[in-house]
Image: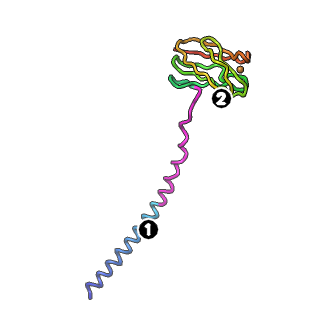
Amino acid sequence: MTSSHIHMKRIGLLLLAGLALAAAGCGSSSSSSSSSSTPAAPASSTANSTASSSGAGKTVTITMKNIQFNPTSQTVKVGTPVKWVNEDTVPHNVQGGPLHSSTFGEGGSYEFTPKTAGTITYVCTIHPNMKATLKVTS
Ligand SMILES: [Cu+2]
């Protein structure tokens, strides 16, 4: 009888100790997780594209919009493909130096890859005020 009584007491103590540990663990873990979960969110959109800088090999796009080339002065390296895209509803072309495109309408494009360094000034012959410069560096 005495031995079983002691046994019961031990189980009770173990249960109380377990509950105390569980409560303590629960409290500490929830508080720490709520404080540590905050700094993860804001660093998501860091790698945005910077289209203005012309890395070698990557196509550089010049748009034709509102009867203007944009940008009017673009610098690229030799071997970098340059693409003119017509975003106007009227047709345009690219003429000057080695640039001899056909006339193309909205959504059309002309591509040219410079092989030598130098400055190319070009126009759209339909709209003589559409002037721009392509600087090619070696
Ligand atoms: Cu034009």
Determine the residue positioned at 43% across, 66% down.
Answer: 24
**First in residue order: circle 1 vs circle 2:** 1
Q: Position of residue 112 (x, y in %)?
A: 57, 19
Q: Is residue 122 magenta?
A: no
The circle drawn on residue 107 is: 2
Residue toward you, 70 or 112: 112
Q: Amino acid at mark 1?
A: Ala
The circle drawn on residue 52 is: none
> Which residue is outermost to the bottom?
1
Instruction: Report helix, strand or loop for mark 1.
Output: helix
Examine the rendered structure and indicate whether residue 110 appears above or below residue 37.
above
Give the quadrant of the N terminus.
bottom left
Q: Which residues are magenta?
A: 30-52
Q: Residues within 10 Å of mark 2 (few under 14, many from 20)?
A: few
Instruction: Report helix, strand or loop for mark 2.
Output: loop
Residue toward you, 76 or 2: 76
Determine the residue positioned at 49% across, 53% down.
Answer: 36
Q: Position of residue 102 (x, y in %)?
A: 65, 18
Q: Position of residue 137 (x, y in %)?
A: 54, 15
Q: Is residue 36 magenta?
A: yes
Q: Position of residue 55 (x, y in %)?
A: 52, 24
Q: Which residue is mark 1?
A: 23
Q: Is residue 132 left or right of residue 24?
A: right
Determine the residue positioned at 56% across, 15% down.
Answer: 136
